[in-house]
């Protein structure tokens, strides 16, 4: 066998292994699917597709048909909405294990197109997609799974509502406090008596989440640092004073 054919066969085997591992990752790392029976797992495995994206690519755009539920396997994605002034508003940042598009499986009559866009934040982002019809069939035959999906939808709605209240009713300083609290709840890791938040967001992206200017974000974070409340590193915050999270 010549070297070129051998190389091609090895590459095919490797790609098949990656795809298999991706599907196994979906079942082994997404807590949502822990209670599925073997038949349901096989259905999901056979219906899952893998997609790789470069930074700034769109996973979907406003107006696209909601035909799949998307799971982030690797990397980060921002869910955005353009305002009337064309300023970007970041509604959510999806990380490994997060998913989006499940509304079409719950209420297909009122959720047929995406009202937001999904833009890749990190290079080599990997997303797994499941057709909405398959996802709907699986959750409707498993009441506990259906309830978990509903809880996720309500949790996301609550967070967006809380952030809206923060933007409308609170000053810039308190909006940054609320941002740190939300990130700590999502991805914070205790370090002794402190809390480490590796958010991997630029100050402009934090501004697009909190509704204040990039310059103001930088100013407030530096004030918190000077007051001894936090320590700043590139794309991360170490919260010294846990009272900031209360």
Image (cartoon, rainbow, N blue to C red):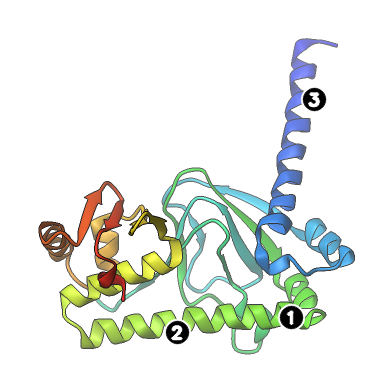
User: Percent from the top left, x then y, of residue 147?
Assistant: 68, 83
Measured Cα–Cα span from mark 2 to mark 1:
21 Å
- Is residue 173 visible in the rendered image? The answer is yes
**Within 10 Å of the Cα at label 1, are there few (<14), some (14-19), or many (20+) other Cα atoms?**
some
User: Percent from the top left, x then y, of residue 105?
Assistant: 68, 79
Residue under pointer 3: 9
Residue under pointer 1: 144
Looking at marks 1 and 3 on the same chain, the residue that comes earlier in the sequence is marked by 3
Tag nearer the camera, 3 or 2: 2
Q: Is residue 64 left or right of residue 189?
A: right
Q: Quadrant of residue 49?
A: bottom right
Looking at marks 3 and 2 on the same chain, the residue that comes earlier in the sequence is marked by 3
Disc 3 secondary structure class: helix
Disc 1 secondary structure class: helix
Q: Is residue 11 left or right of residue 159?
A: right
Measured Cα–Cα span from mark 1 to mark 3:
43 Å
Q: Is residue 61 left or right of residue 47?
A: left
157 and 85: which is toward the camera: 157
Q: Quadrant of residue 243?
A: bottom left
Q: Are marks 1 and 3 in contact (CB under 8 Å)?
A: no
Instruction: Check the picture and name the quadrant holding the C terminus.
Output: bottom left
Residue under pointer 2: 158
Q: Are marks 2 and 1 in contact (CB under 8 Å)?
A: no
């Amino acid at each position: 066998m010549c070297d070129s054919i051998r190389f091609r066969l090895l590459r095919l085997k490797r790609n098949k292994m990656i795809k298999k591992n991706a599907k196994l990752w979906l079942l082994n790392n997404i807590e949502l699917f822990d209670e599925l029976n073997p038949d349901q797992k096989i259905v999901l495995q056979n219906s899952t597709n893998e997609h790789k994206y470069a930074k700034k690519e769109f996973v979907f755009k406003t107006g696209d048909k909601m035909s799949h539920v998307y799971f982030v396997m690797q990397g980060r994605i921002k869910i955005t909405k353009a305002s009337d002034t064309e300023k970007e508003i970041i509604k959510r940042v999806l990380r490994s294990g997060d998913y989006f598009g499940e509304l079409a499986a719950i209420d297909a009559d009122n959720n047929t197109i995406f009202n937001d866009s999904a833009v890749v934040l990190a290079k080599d982002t990997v997303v797994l997609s499941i057709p909405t019809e398959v996802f709907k069939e699986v959750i409707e035959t498993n009441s506990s799974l259906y309830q978990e999906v509903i809880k996720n939808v309500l949790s996301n709605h609550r967070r967006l509502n809380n952030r809206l209240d923060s933007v409308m009713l609170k000053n810039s300083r308190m909006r940054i406090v609320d941002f740190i609290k939300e990130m700590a709840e999502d991805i914070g890791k205790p370090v002794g008596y402190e809390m480490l938040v590796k958010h991997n967001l630029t100050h402009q992206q934090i501004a697009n989440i909190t509704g204040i200017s990039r310059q103001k974000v930088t100013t407030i974070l530096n004030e918190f640092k000077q007051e001894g409340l936090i320590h700043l590193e590139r794309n991360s915050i170490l919260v010294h004073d846990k009272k900031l999270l209360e």
